[in-house]
Amino acid sequence: MVTPIILTLIAIAFVLIVIEDIIHVNKAKTTLFFGTLCWIIAFISPIHGQSPENVQHALDHNILEIATLWLFLMAAMTFVAYLNSKGFIQNIVHRVMPSQISERKLMFLVGIAAFVFSSISDNITATLISLAVVMSLKLDPKKLIKYATLIIFSVNSGGVSLITGDVTTLMIFLADKVTIPNLLLLVGPALVSVVALAAMLSIGMNEQLRFEKQIQRRIEKTDITIAVIFTSTIFATLFLSVQYQVPPLLTFLFGLSLMFLVAQFLMRKKDVNKKIIDYIREIEYDTLLFFVGVLLLVGALKEVGVLAMFTDLYVYIAPEYANYLMGLLSAAVDNVPLTAALLKADIVMTPQQWLMFTYATGVGGSMLVIGSAAGIIAMSKVKALTFMSYLRMFLYLLIAYTIGYAGAYVAGQFM
């Protein structure tokens, strides 16, 4: 009896996210309300007759995932908040950008830049930086939605071929389903799909964008130092994660502490009213609370056994088609537990089919704005970007995803 109740509450929560613009209730409030309510019900009337200890263990595991993401986001967003407030990112953009550029050329430039950046950093950082650059250009809201859509898809595509770029890619690699040389074959198809999406989104965008050359602000020594620490933290995260299995969260928090200490020393002789640690307050906590609510809902979905049901797809249809559908499903359900469920089910697939599954779960979340961390961050940053406005781009996204998936099939022939 409890399972239908929890599923109904989860469905209501997702509907409220969709109609946020109509009811004018922040999605962070509704997801947090229903996410916590589902778990309270799970304790009062345990799912499948589980003991309170088992429910507590499941909640602890869910909370650990949430805490890890929360702290990582907090660290990355503090770096970006500081550099944004100092005008560092805008300053760099205006120095690098030409006095004018076509909207079409900018579309390709943004897509490829987001793709490359997400390949050398994590998706969250890549999204934050890419959005900060685009939003500094003060584009028309409708056009900004297109650029944000491209960034979400590009960021998810960029990390899919590296074990440090996407959690599900790492999970599949650690399960010995694919090798690193296999994964590198995905770079081509993923990049082609990004270019294809950029081409589709740029249709009808023929205007020239003129950038007013603002008076160049002097880049402070402190800002340069913190930018270097930020960049070094990203590369250190990749190196230490691969070489010594140091959790990315730990490295990023170390980088944040280094930022605080160095900035405190550099600012000691300056007459500043704002302490460096105060920039934590500029983080959009709505975004973090939304993450908490969504992950609590997904955790509840996992506990009622819905995720395990998805693996039944492989009983009725061929893996090539099932993988494609699993990618689309990952837009509505977190791809990490979805991948974990499939790995635990011991589905028999060839290395080529596992490669296709890796692409599908890594990029499929781009189909809905709530389907990936990049989408949720973008929705909190760009006011014009809502569930419905993003949904209008679904056909373009589906075509690009299909092109990339077909490319993964072809790439798998060379394994």
Image (cartoon, helix red, strand yellow):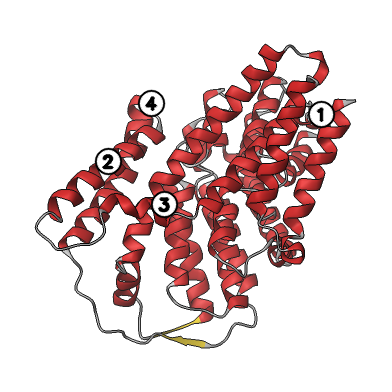
Identify the residue at horizontal 25%, vertical 47% (top origin): 259
Circle 3: residue type: Met
What's under tag 2, amino acid-wise?
A: Ser
Residue that badge 1 annotates: 309
Q: Earlier in the sequence, mark 2 or mark 3?
A: 3
Q: Do callouts 2 and 4 mark residues in contact (Cβ within 8 Å)?
A: no
User: Between marks 3 and 1, how big is the CA–CA gap?
Assistant: 36 Å
Q: Nearer the viewer, residue 35 or 393?
A: 35
Q: In this figure, which residue is indicated by the disc labeled 2?
A: 257
Q: Which mark is residue 245?
A: 4
Secondary element type, mark 1: helix
> At numbered mark 2, what does the secondary structure look like: helix, strand or loop?
helix
In this rendered view, identify the residue nearer to me: 85 or 136.
85
Task: Report the side of 75 relative to 367 (left or right).
Answer: left
Quadrant of the snapshot with the N terminus: top right
Pointers 3 and 1 in contact (C-beta within 8 Å): no
Identify the element where label 4 is drawn: loop
Q: Position of residue 390 (x, y in %)?
A: 68, 63
Instruction: Classify 71 as above or below 16.
Output: above
| CA distance separating discs 4 and 1 | 32 Å
Disc 3 is placed on an element classified as helix
Residue 101 or residue 57, whichever sits in front: 57
**At x 69% / y 38%, what residue is drawn?**
35
Amino acid carrying mark 4 in the image: Gln
Which residue position holds label 3?
77
The local crowd at label 3, few if under 14, some if 14 to 19, many if 20 or more residues have their Cα within 10 Å, is: many
Whether residue 73 is visible to the viewer of this picture, yes or no, is: yes
